[in-house]
Amino acid sequence: MIYLLIGAGGIIGSLLRYSLGVLTHPWLSDGFPLGTLLANLIGCFILGWFTTSIVRLKLFHPHILAGLGTGLVGSFTTFSTFSVETVLLLRSGSILMAFIYVLLSFAGGLFVTWCGYNLGRRMFKKRGEAAS
């Protein structure tokens, strides 16, 4: 059952990532991979929040949590596409753009993960206080 839930989450996550890429492509014509950057930043935030709020509440079966975390968010975000796009930027001579992309991806990813993590902690804390 866990494999089906992870697979279903993976299908949804990859379709969402592809759709985000299609939607953001017209925004920039200079080759900056905005869709992948947004997918990775959104996924970092969601996973940071998810692991500190939803998982700790223990409202869902672990298989469902794996389907959401590993399947959906895991397929929505992509390190391999980030890596290939960085190499393509470097090969095309867009060294500054590649540097900005890497910096935004790593620093931005850590920052939004931290934000999601803290939001999840506050939500969990407030929920615990409300239950008391």
Image: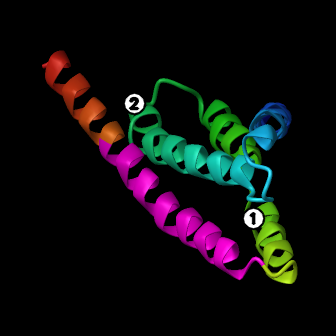
The percent position of residue 47, horizontal first and vertical second, equals: 53, 45
Query: Which image quadrant for residue 31?
Result: bottom right
Q: Secondary structure at mark 2?
A: helix
**Mark 1 belongs to which amino acid?**
Phe
Q: Nearer the viewer, residue 87 or 62?
A: 87
- Residue 126, which numbered label? none
Say whether residue 123 is left or right of residue 1: left
Q: Quadrant of the N terminus?
A: top right
- Residue 57, which numbered label? 2
- Residue 82, which numbered label? 1
Q: Viewer-nearest of labels 2 and 1?
A: 1
The percent position of residue 4, horizontal first and vertical second, equals: 85, 33
The percent position of residue 115, horizontal first and vertical second, equals: 36, 48
Q: Nearer the viewer, residue 63 or 17?
A: 17
Q: Which residue is at a point 30% across and 46% down the rendered structure image? A: 118
Can residue 59 be spotted in the picture?
Answer: yes
Can residue 14 be spotted in the picture?
Answer: no
Badge 2, how many Cα within 10 Å: few under 14, some, many 20+?
A: few
Q: Nearer the viewer, residue 132 or 12?
A: 12
Q: Quadrant of the C terminus?
A: top left
Tell me whether the residue at label 2 lies in contact with that at label 1, contact meaning CB atoms closer than 8 angstroms.
Answer: no
Main SS of residues in magenta = helix
Say whether residue 46 is left or right of residue 96: left
Q: Mark 2 or mark 1: which comes first in sequence?
A: 2
Q: Nearer the viewer, residue 117 or 87?
A: 87
Q: Which residue is at a point 81% across and 33% down the rendered structure image? A: 19
Query: Which image quadrant for residue 13?
Result: top right
**Mark 2 belongs to which amino acid?**
Leu
Tell me which segment is drawn in magenta: 94-118
Say whether residue 77 is left or right of residue 41: right
Q: Which residue is at a point 47% across and 24% down the rendered structure image? A: 59
Instruction: Examine the rendered structure and indicate whether residue 56 appears above or below residue 95.
Output: above
